[in-house]
Image (cartoon, coloured by chain):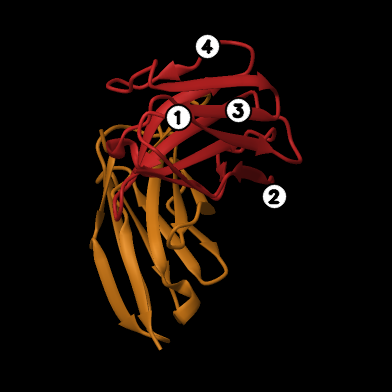
Chain colours: A red, B orange
């Protein structure tokens, strides 16, 4: 199956700093990737849809200036949490649909962000 | 907002027993999918069932879909300790739709 790599798997940063998380499709091209946020023991909340070569589409309530998404190539999307605060601490997961468009999503392993 | 709600929220069974999880959703769908998530990891796709299908099997997994009741169930037979994980249903609203909407999840614990 398609492989999605996410990096870093965990990061600790100081309040006020920015953190970048990368999501790569390793063996397929993904014109669209998705970024989710997950709180402990809860479901996934879709934050935004990342579109290659165009602006991301954010879900209602997600701050665009806070969570910057860039999809510069068909295999890479990045999420930058700007001026991070402790309430931004969470598990962030990216995913992509494979080229076969059979419907399923392939997920990265997630990135756990802790803001001190 | 959550499209799907899973029931039960948590389930503990003895190894070897069968585990059944249910998912209810609100709107018409193109397909429904089940995913598994080990603690602190990403999600892994298990099975997809289309709106015109009623039952599907994959190994020890059996999924049913009742579109009239807007519900689905996931049955794991002969459970193993390694099946311990959270299981999520996700709905795909229409063909060509890019987004999946995930349910609230069931935390399954298999007791050795």
**Mark linked to residue A1:** 2
Does label 4 lie on the same chain as label 2?
A: yes
Does label 1 lie on the same chain as label 3?
A: no
**Mark linked to residue B99:** 1
Asked if residue B37 lies left or right of residue A3, the reply is left
What residue does disc 3 label? A77
Asked if residue A70 lies left or right of residue B29, the reply is right
What residue does disc 4 label? A55
Does label 3 lie on the same chain as label 4?
A: yes
Q: Quadrant of residue B28 in the image?
A: top left
Q: Quadrant of residue A65 in the image?
A: top left
Chain for mark 2? A
Q: Circles 2 and 4: CB distance less than 8 Å?
A: no
Chain for mark 3? A
Residue B37 seen in render: yes
Q: Circles 1 and 4: CB distance less than 8 Å?
A: no
Dot 2 alpha-carbon crowd within 10 angstroms: few under 14, some 14 to 19, many 20 or more: few
Question: What percent of the width, then of the height, locates residue A48?
Answer: 43, 25
Sequence order check: which comes first, mark 3 or mark 2? 2
Q: Does residue B58 sit above or below A45 in this rendering?
A: below
Q: Circles 3 and 2: CB distance less than 8 Å?
A: no
Sequence order check: which comes first, mark 2 or mark 4? 2
Dot 3 alpha-carbon crowd within 10 angstroms: few under 14, some 14 to 19, many 20 or more: many
Residue in the image at 23% along x and 61% along y: B9
């Amino acid at each position: 199956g398609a492989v999605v790599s996410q990096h870093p798997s965990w990061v600790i940063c100081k309040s006020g700093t920015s953190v970048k998380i990368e999501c790569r499709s390793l063996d397929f091209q993904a014109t669209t990737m998705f970024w989710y946020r997950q709180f402990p023991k809860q479901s996934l909340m879709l934050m935004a849809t990342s579109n290659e070569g165009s602006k991301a589409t954010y879900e209602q309530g997600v701050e665009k200036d806070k969570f910057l998404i860039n999809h510069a190539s068909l295999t890479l999307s990045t999420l930058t949490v700007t001026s991070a605060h402790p309430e931004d601490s969470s598990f962030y997961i990216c995913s992509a649909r494979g080229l076969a468009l059979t419907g399923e999503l392939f997920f990265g392993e997630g990135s756990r962000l802790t803001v001190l | 907002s959550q499209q799907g709600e899973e029931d039960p929220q948590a389930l503990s069974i003895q190894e070897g027993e069968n585990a059944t999880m249910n998912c209810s959703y609100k709107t018409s769908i193109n397909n429904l999918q089940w995913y598994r998530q080990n603690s602190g990891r990403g999600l892994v796709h298990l099975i997809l069932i289309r709106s015109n299908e009623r039952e599907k099997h994959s190994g020890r997994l059996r999924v049913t879909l009742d579109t009239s009741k807007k519900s689905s169930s996931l049955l794991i037979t002969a459970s193993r300790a390694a099946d311990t994980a959270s299981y999520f249903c996700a709905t795909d609203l229409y063909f060509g739709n890019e987004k999946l909407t995930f349910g609230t999840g069931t935390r399954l614990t298999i007791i050795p």
